[in-house]
Amino acid sequence: MLFAILTGIASLVLLGLVLISFRLFDVQQDLGKLRDSALPRLVKLAQLSQEASASSSIAPALSTKPTRFEFETLLSRIKDKETSQKALIEELAELFQNPDAAEVLRENGNLLIANLQTLTDVVREQIAVGKRLEDYGLAFRRLIMRSPRVDEPAARPTSNEATVAELARTNGFRILNALLDPNQARFSRNKSEIETGMRQLASHVTAGTEASSVQSGSLLSTARELLRFWLSKKDTIYADKATELSNEFKIKALAEENSLIANRLLSTVSTEFWRASSNLESQIRLVNETTQFALISIIVVVIAFGAGNFLVWVILKGRVFTRLDRMRDALRAYAENRDRMLDDPIPDEIGEISGSLMNYMAVIDEREAQLADKSSALEQLSNQLAKYLSPQVYASIFSGKQEVKVTSTRKKLTIFFSDIAGFTETADRLESEDLTQLLNHYLTEMSQIALDHGATIDKYVGDAILIFFGDPETKGVKEDALACVEMALAMRQRMYDLEDAWRKSGIEKPLRVRMGIHTGYCTVGNFGSEDRMDYTIVGGAVNVASRLEASATPGDILVSYETFAHVNDRVYCEERGEIEVKGIAYPLATYQVIDTYDKLGRERRRFREQHAHVRLDLDLDAMTMEDRSQAARILLRALDLLDEVGKGQHRTRWGK
């Protein structure tokens, strides 16, 4: 039944997916058309419309008599617009399905560019003509300004000379006005007046005679120069002025024509734009319809899928999930109190699993009983074996940090040796039972102190104890050495506390313990064979610690310089000279541990001064006798040098 339902759901979903895929393919095709045709055509038409508007705005600017710089700027814009407009029209021609529309755009665009080029040529000619007429005007203005006025006090002209001067100024201004007048009719009238006035000026100049005054000669000379310049440039001036007036008309006509062509181009672009917009809307409508169909198909598929899943859920809940819940509850009850309440009468796969689980539960109960017996035996055995190992070694082995095999490493450790002074004599005075009780009590007390300080107990040799710090766990060489010395101080204090209890038990003389401590490199690890091994340390440092213990006074703690260097800032020690150790070529410096500075209620004797050019640092507790003698010699030598530099200052002054 589940197979039939799931097959129906899968078929429906597959059919819906096929229909949706076909519709989505149609959407993709329509969107491809929009991307490749409609949208690019709209964008190009909008750009062409902007270019045409920009091109049509250039013509009015050209018709306003631009300067040469403005003309060059407009010319550069025309070239840019020509290039971009042609490129846009060619791109649109590839996008248009109707070649006639593309041809109309191309024709109007070419006409607009050709009109602008013609207008540019006319304006260029107009600028050149205007420049020449401006130069002529400047020349005439200079000649007029050179002509003296006849009403000046210094001038005494004759009547003919006065007439010549007046005619020269009048005709000069007429020429200037004619050069600047843009009206064609007035230019013809001014031309007639100029010709008449210049003939009159020529007759008066010819009839005049040289005056005796310098001023009169200047008047006639200026008039003759004006006549000569006019006669030489008259035809050119008339021709340039006629060209200027003609170009004014051409420019206005071309500007109007440019506006008409631009309007036609814009009209064509607008028509094509709206046609492309309509095409785009129709394609968008098709895309929307296809999208709606795909959406409806998806909704139908989702609803069918949900209904099928609900039906599957109902069947699974009644036939599978409820039975699995009962199985889970039964397994949970079995895990908590071993109640076997699993029973499923339906003969299907789940029923078979339930029966198999019942059999497994019976097997598990039997195996757990066996395992509990073996675990109890192993736990008892483990607790018994732990008595033969140091707690650190035991923890590292049973936690898996350390493998039980013959191996070793070299480490810097702090080694502790201790034994009871005169123990043989004490043993002779006691019965074996009392001796055993005393020794076990002593070793128990010392071992507990060692474990409290994190020590690794290596072995007991009669009344002697070998302990080390730094393996399998370490806090650092300095901290390990300090912990070892503090352990030894605690052991010594505990021995004082036990004296009364031992006296009451019949021991006449109190026990005195010698202790030796040394810090150095040792080889630590498992030594022996694969069948029988011992976790211990070997090396010269172990021998040094043993020799220090043998050299210690009963009740005291003797340490080497290596240990002293690590603990002297926290523990007060006194130098006890040097000892010879077998196997070592040089004597060893030894120090007796007194107590920690905190318990002694005193500070470490140390003198330290530091100034700009003076630094003095004396650690009196750390110095040996030889060190103190050497320091005294150095200080005396320094005082002698200061006396020599002081030139007459007495040494007693420094002694104060």
Image (tube, rainbow, N blue to C red):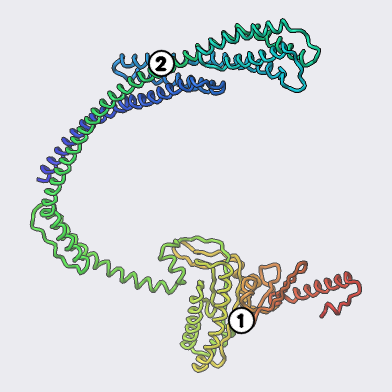
Crowding near the residue tagged with mark 2, few <14, some 14–19, many ≥20 C-alpha atoms within 10 Å:
some
- Residue at the disc numbered 1: 595
- Name the image quarter holding the N terminus: top left
In this view, the residue in front, 400 or 55, is 55
Q: Residue furthest front?
A: 159
Residue 129 sits in which quadrant? top right
Residue at x 87% of width, y 77% of height? 651
Q: Is residue 360 left or right of residue 169?
A: left
Q: Amino acid at mark 1?
A: Asp
Crowding near the residue tagged with mark 1, few <14, some 14–19, many ≥20 C-alpha atoms within 10 Å:
some
Check disc 2 and report its element: helix, strand or loop.
helix
Kindly tell me whether residue 461 is visible in this rendering. Answer: yes
Q: Is residue 186 left or right of residue 520?
A: left
Residue 641 sits in which quadrant? bottom right
In this view, the residue in front, 654 or 88, is 88
Kindly tell me whether residue 547 is visible in this rendering. Answer: no
In this rendering, is residue 171 above or below 77? Answer: above
Residue at x 69% of width, y 75% of height? 622
Residue contact at pointers 2 and 1, CB within 8 angstroms: no
Image coordinates for residue 602, horizontal then vertical, percent: 64, 82
Image coordinates for residue 160, horizontal then vertical, percent: 72, 11
Image coordinates for residue 20, horizontal then vertical, percent: 20, 34
Q: Nearer the viewer, mark 2 or mark 1?
A: 2
Residue at x 68% of width, y 5% of height? 203
In this view, the residue in front, 399 or 224, is 224
The numbered mark, 2 or 1, whose residue comes first in the sequence reads 2
Residue 366 sits in which quadrant? bottom left
- Residue at the disc numbered 2: 257
Image coordinates for residue 353, horizontal then vertical, percent: 15, 55
Residue at x 14% of width, y 62% of height? 342
- Name the image quarter holding the C terminus: bottom right
